[in-house]
Amino acid sequence: MDFIRQILVRAKHWHIFFLLIGTYALSVLAVTQLSPKLKPGIEHNSISLCLLIAAGIAPYILSVFGWLWAAGSLFNANLQPELRLRTGFFRFAIVYAVLGLVFGLPVLWASNQRQQDWLTLPAFFGVICIVYIMKFTAKTFANLNRGRRSSLWNYGGYMVEFLSIPLFVWKIQPRINRLSATAEKPTA
């Protein structure tokens, strides 16, 4: 996993942008081609069709959350020790959000109303995890920029910007590249 993080941290902003846009286009193509074959509320929807849709959306979801994980981890690691945030729930939230989106969305599309009712609580928790991931990454970025603890007023704007991740990458990835380069330099 560290190898993947290093690739995402060292990549140029346009590499990440095209990775996100390319995987998004593939995901949209896969879902638009496969989802008409799913008929909501029909019990005999094929699990293999749901898995094909999951495979179609997985590259985009993995790209987005992989980049958020790499950025948040790098920002947190470069903070002064007293400003660092705990990463336990951040890591759990990344895994839960990725698995929930990759496998939960196709099941949600293929299920009937009763099955969807059972998925409401896990889906709501998934939304909480996604908001936390955005908060963690935005807060560590704000703490790094300010050199002290940030309040919601300081990092709230970054959270909103993370909603448009492909565009935000153009702004944030050069900073990630600089942080990565300074972290790799040996100290004397």
Image: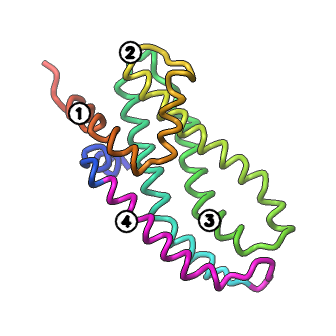
Q: CA distance from mark 1 to mark 3?
A: 36 Å
Q: Callout 2, which amino acid?
A: Gly
**Residue found at x 26% / y 49%:** 11
Q: Are marks 1 and 4 in contact (CB under 8 Å)?
A: no
Disc 1 or disc 4, which is closer to the eye?
4
**Element on which disc 4 rests:** helix
Disc 1 or disc 3, which is closer to the eye?
1
Q: CA distance from mark 1 to mark 4?
A: 25 Å
Q: Are marks 3 and 2 in contact (CB under 8 Å)?
A: no
**Element on which disc 3 rests:** helix
- Using residue 42 as the reference point, say whether residue 100 is left or right of it: left
The count of marks equals: 4
Q: Which mark is residue 178?
A: 1
**Residue found at x 66% / y 42%:** 128
Q: Callout 1, which amino acid?
A: Arg
Mark 3 Cα-neighbour bin, 10 Å: few <14, some 14–19, many ≥20: some
Q: Specify whether residue 42 is painted magenta.
A: yes
Q: Are marks 1 and 3 in contact (CB under 8 Å)?
A: no
| Residue identifier under label 4 | 22
Q: Position of residue 4 (x, y in %)?
A: 34, 51
- Using residue 179 as the reference point, say whether residue 56 is left or right of it: right
| Residue identifier under label 3 | 103
Disc on the earlier residue, 1 or 4: 4
Q: CA distance from mark 2 to mark 1?
A: 16 Å
| Residue identifier under label 2 | 147
- Position of residue 125 relative to residue 39, above or below, is above
The range drawn in magenta is 16-44
Q: Position of residue 70 (x, y in %)?
A: 39, 42
Q: CA distance from mark 4 to mark 3?
A: 21 Å
- Position of residue 45 relative to residue 140, above or below, is below
